[in-house]
Structure formats: structure tokens, C-alpha cells
Image (cartoon, rainbow, N blue to C red):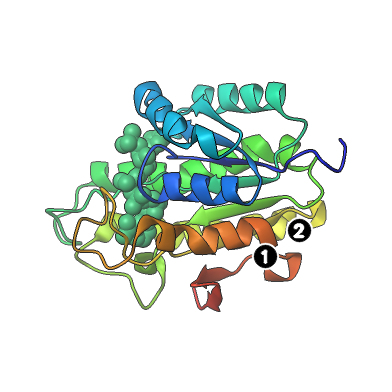
Amino acid sequence: MTSSTPKTALVTGGNGGIGTAICQGLLKSGFKVFLAARSADKGQTAVASLSDQGAIELVQLDITDDSSIQSAVKQVGQKANSLDVLINNAGIYPDADVDILTVSRERLNHAMNTNTFSPIGLTQAFIPLLEKSNSPRVINISSGNGQLEGISADVPSYSLSKMALNGATILLSRALKPKNIAVYAMGPGWVRTNMGGDAAPRSPEEGADTAVWLATSGTMAQTGKFFRDRTEQPF
Ligand code: NAP
């Protein structure tokens, strides 16, 4: 690779909300971006909306499907020598009408599978490409609902899945330290997206800011930590 080769990043759930804003911020910082989306149509629309801002390509990826993950790894490997940043942004919030006393096992499974197990699987699958980067980073988009002080009985599956994602961040950071791969968790705050709704105080760009900052400036000294507003916070 030459020194002019752009850094590369893959953002899951890049077709909307915070994911699209992260893609935009990374393009502004000079990254080549792989915008991953499970719907080819939605992904293509998002790529088209950003294509005048830099090098961006669609990768079709359902994060809960291992064969889809393998095909995404293959696709990125064919287009880039390495992956500098993996951003595990895609997530679900399935608790609108339940609480901890009524949530079903099925819903708990769905939330854990999407919000926790999929980022773990994606990180595992992208290790060979991340290892080829000079400063590889994995950024898990978590939530204040996943922090011990922010878990809520009214959003049970989401809180537990993001709390477990924070745990996975710690475990992955320890396991990947010898490979010099940094792993961070971050909370975007309450953001105006399909998930956050119209009443949320933050724009998608504000929600994306800390993830873009970690992608460009995160250090190994910060690995395994939780951030909000570019500041370390307790898990
Ligand atoms: P959003 O607008 O609902 O976007 C979620 C994204 O995840 C969509 O692109 C969605 O794809 C994708 N996704 C869901 N399941 C997927 C799967 N199995 N495979 C691939 N993609 C999948 O929500 P957002 O607010 O931007 O959320 C982004 C991240 O921020 C999430 O991890 C969320 O938990 C976190 N967060 C958000 C807030 C907030 O206030 N908005 C607060 C704290 C944390 P489709 O369009 O195909 O459904």
C-alpha cells in the first residue's frame, strides 16, 4: 500500500439514521467507506445520496446471517487490502410494548442475536482484514441503556443486549490487544432516527460524532472503554 491509499471502514446498518451519518463523517475524513445494508434497495439509495462526497460502495449484509457475513468479508477483501475500521452500528429496539415482566424469550433472543452476537461474529470474521491495517479499530455502537446506570425495566431486551455488547467490547478488547486491534463501545445519546423518533434532541450527525472521532483518533490506550461525547464513561 502507498501512503496515499485511503483508510477503509465498513459500517453496518449504513442505510439510515446514525449509520448513514457515520458514513458521511468518514467520507469527510477521507475514508473509503463500505456501506453495509441488509436491503440492497435501501443501501443503494443511501450510497447514491453520499457518492458525491467520496469513495463509497454498497455491501449487502444481514448481520444475523453467517453466510452473509462471510460474503461481506470476501467482497471487502476483493476491493481492499485491509480493513482499518469496523463499525458495528446496525441494531434493533424491539421493546415498544413490553417490560421485564412480560418480555418473551423469543424477543430476548432476537435482541441478543442482533445487538450482541452479530457484532461479535462480525468482529471475528473481519479479524484477518483488520490485522492487515496499521491501526485497526472496532467500534460498537452501544447505548446509555446498556450502561449499568441506564438499564431500564421498560426496555428489557434492548438494555440487556447493549449491556452484553459492552461486555463483549471488554472481552474482545482483551483478546485483540496482542494483535493491536482496538475495540471501543460508544453511546450516541438520544438521536432523531427511525429508532429514536422525532422528539429526540440530537441530530444523526451529533449521534455519529464520537464514532467518527474514535475511527480517526482512537488509541490503544483507550481500548476496551465506553465513550460518549468524546469522553470516557463508566460501563
Ligand atoms: P435506525 O435508524 O433504526 O437504524 C438501524 C439500522 O440497523 C438500519 O439500517 C437497519 O436496517 C439496521 N439493521 C437492523 N437489523 C439488521 C440486520 N439484521 N442486518 C443488517 N442491518 C440491520 O436506528 P439508529 O438510531 O440509526 O441506530 C443505530 C445504532 O445506534 C443502533 O445500534 C442503536 O441501538 C444505537 N442507538 C441509537 C439511539 C437513538 O436514539 N437513535 C440511542 C442509543 C443507541 P433496515 O433499514 O433494513 O431495518
Q: Are marks 2 and 1 in contact (CB under 8 Å)?
A: yes
Label 1 belongs to which residue? 223
Q: Quadrant of residue 191?
A: bottom left
Residue at position x 52%, y 27% from top? 59
- Secondary structure at numbered mark 2: helix
22 is higher (above) or lower (below) than 5: below
Q: Between 92 and 209, which is closer to the camera in this rendering?
A: 209
Residue 123 position (above or below residue 80):
below
Q: Is residue 27 above or below residue 176?
A: above
Badge 2 crowding class, 10 Å Cα cut-off, few under 14, some 14 to 19, many 20 or more, is some
Camera sees residue 109: no
Give the image quarter of residue 159. Answer: bottom left
Q: Which residue is mark 2?
A: 177
Q: How many marks?
A: 2
Pair 2/1: label in front: 1
Which kind of residue does numbered mark 1 sit on?
A: Thr
Q: What residue is drawn where x is 63% and y is 65%?
A: 224
Quarter location, residue 163: bottom left
Amino acid identity at mark 2? Lys
* 51, 107: nearer the viewer: 51
Crowding around mark 1 (Cα neighbors within 10 Å: few <14, some 14 to 19, many 20+) is many
Residue 141 falls left or right of residue 172: left
Q: Residue 209, position in %: x, y?
A: 50, 62
Horizontal and vertical percent for residue 55? 61, 34
